[in-house]
Image (tube, rainbow, N blue to C red):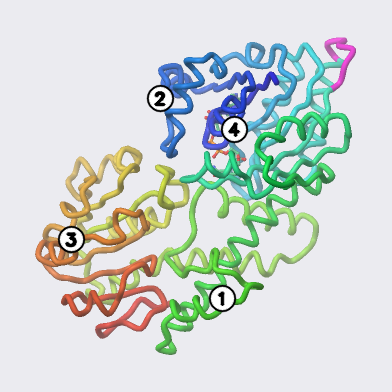
Amino acid sequence: MRICVIGAGYVGLVAAACFAEMGNRVICVERDPERLARLARGEAPIYEPGLEPMLKTHLNSGQLSFCRQLEQGTARAEVIFIAVGTPAGEDGSADLSHVLAVADELGERLEQACVVVDKSTVPVGTGERVAQRINSGLSRRGKGFRVVVASNPEFLKEGSAIADFMRPDRVIIGCDDEASALVLRRLYAPFLRNHERLLCMGLRAAEFTKYAANAFLATKISFINEMAGLCARLDVDIEQVRRGIGSDRRIGTHFIYAGCGYGGSCFPKDVRALIRTAEHEGIEPGILRAVEARNALQKTLLFQGLREHFGQHLQGRVVALWGLAFKPGTDDLREAPSLVLLDALLAAGASVQACDPVAIAAVSERYAQAVSGGQLRLSESPYAVAEGADALVLVTEWKQFRQPDFIRIRGAMRMPVLFDGRNIYDAKYLSELGFLYRGIGRPALGRCMVSAA
Ligand SMILES: NC(=O)c1ccc[n+]([C@@H]2O[C@H](COP(=O)([O-])OP(=O)(O)OC[C@H]3O[C@@H](n4cnc5c(N)ncnc54)[C@H](O)[C@@H]3O)[C@@H](O)[C@H]2O)c1
């Protein structure tokens, strides 16, 4: 099939590469010239395991190409995917300006009937607005055809995006037109060969499903974090509780890890957007508000713990941070818990030595002043940042941080104090090595612990 994908971000680029992998001819339209130049050289502008080799292969074979002009990308396309960003607007609702601008441009430029698919996460009713804008542009230009707009929300996870796209848990197609739905069924058939995981539903239901899914996952995280806060007070280890409840199949083991909060480009903005939708409809979103409030609190716990430990004074302390990206496997910093901690530490006058396998460049750009002033030192080596530190804080649980040489680390640190923001370490083992260990919602093997208010 001839496919056009508009927007070469985490979603658009992965979708474009995976559609090309299945033998489709894909043109990806990207408006950012710097990003486009890198893509033309076969470089992935984002860190996503497995993406760059796929881009190179399909650029070379001609299955995949990139361009700046919309009309070049859409010419002869049978399916057009809109995969541009929908960040939070000032009031928290989804900012649809990029999506609607694409719709207007499609109305001005499209030359053939095709299926337009909204892959961006958008509030209920957006597909109808997009269709209305495109079709009124087409009729203004006297074109004798109309387009159908479908919704195909994306569920990939950054860090495993290629695998998720190639072998999806499910594909959701929201489309009120049978013939267009059939085109999308055909496009997705090679990704769903093992068993049928394609769910067809109404356009509005598909749009809502994406928000409901993210809100539910965020709720699981905030729920376990609230339980962790209680555990910390009651001298109970949340890790034991997690295993205890996760073994119940109705609860399951996923997304019930206590930690220093969720971040990323989806959960925070999607929960906020759903809150605004509910308010707009006159419904009190009590659960969603609590999820958001708990997460905001959770992101402050590591700093609170450090302040409690050092008696409020962090001026002149050296704090080592492991992991800056919002989760392992990505260089994405959007809404990362590390940023809340970094901001607080720098404002309190601490010196920070931070390490991340792939997000260093983005962090040094964001904190250019602190880096040039020497208050923030960045390195790819976890051992280098532990050197002379008064405390080590694990924020993002990259695999390389899971089993480090703790004896070497203890020797490098000025004080062997470890804050485990993801509860990945064996507290008993670390305390035997001489560390003062603080987890989230775990009894401290020392005197104080990180606890929720
Ligand atoms: N990142 C994720 O893990 C993820 C997962 C599921 C769904 N989503 C949703 O998918 C959508 C895209 O997310 P993302 O993380 O890929 O965004 P992104 O910000 O990484 O990428 C968007 C890209 O679109 C480009 N763009 C914007 N307007 C354009 C235009 N008019 N023409 C051409 N290019 C244009 C931008 O330059 C950028 O490269 C969002 O709605 C998001 O909520 C994201």
401 left or right, relative to 5: left
Rendering quarter of residue 101 = top right
Residue underneath mark 2: 43
Residue at 55%, 64% (x, y): give it.
254
Q: Please identify, in this view, whether the residue under mark 2 or under mark 3 is nearer the observer.
A: 2
Q: Earlier in the sequence, mark 1 or mark 3?
A: 1
Residue underneath mark 4: 15
Residue 137, horizontal then vertical, whole percent: 81, 18
**Quadrant where ligand 1 appears:** top right
Q: Please identify, in this view, whether the residue under mark 1 or under mark 2 is nearer the observer.
A: 1
Residue 348, horizontal then vertical, whole percent: 27, 61
Is 229 part of what is drawn in magenta?
A: no
In this view of the protein, which residue sits in the foreground, 450 or 168?
168
Q: CA distance from mark 1 to mark 4?
A: 34 Å
Q: Secondary structure at mark 3?
A: strand
Three-letter code, disc 4 = Ala
In this view of the protein, which residue sits in the foreground, 179 or 358?
179
Residue at 66%, 48% (x, y): give it.
93
Q: Earlier in the sequence, mark 3 or mark 4?
A: 4
Q: CA distance from mark 3 to mark 4?
A: 43 Å
Dots 2 and 3: beta carbons under 8 Å? no
Rendered view: 116 above or below 228? above
Residue at 20%, 50% (x, y): give it.
375
Q: Check disc 1: other Cα within 10 Å, few if <14, some if 14-19, many if 20+.
A: few
Q: Looking at mark 4, is its residue's CB closer than 8 Å to ligand 1?
A: no
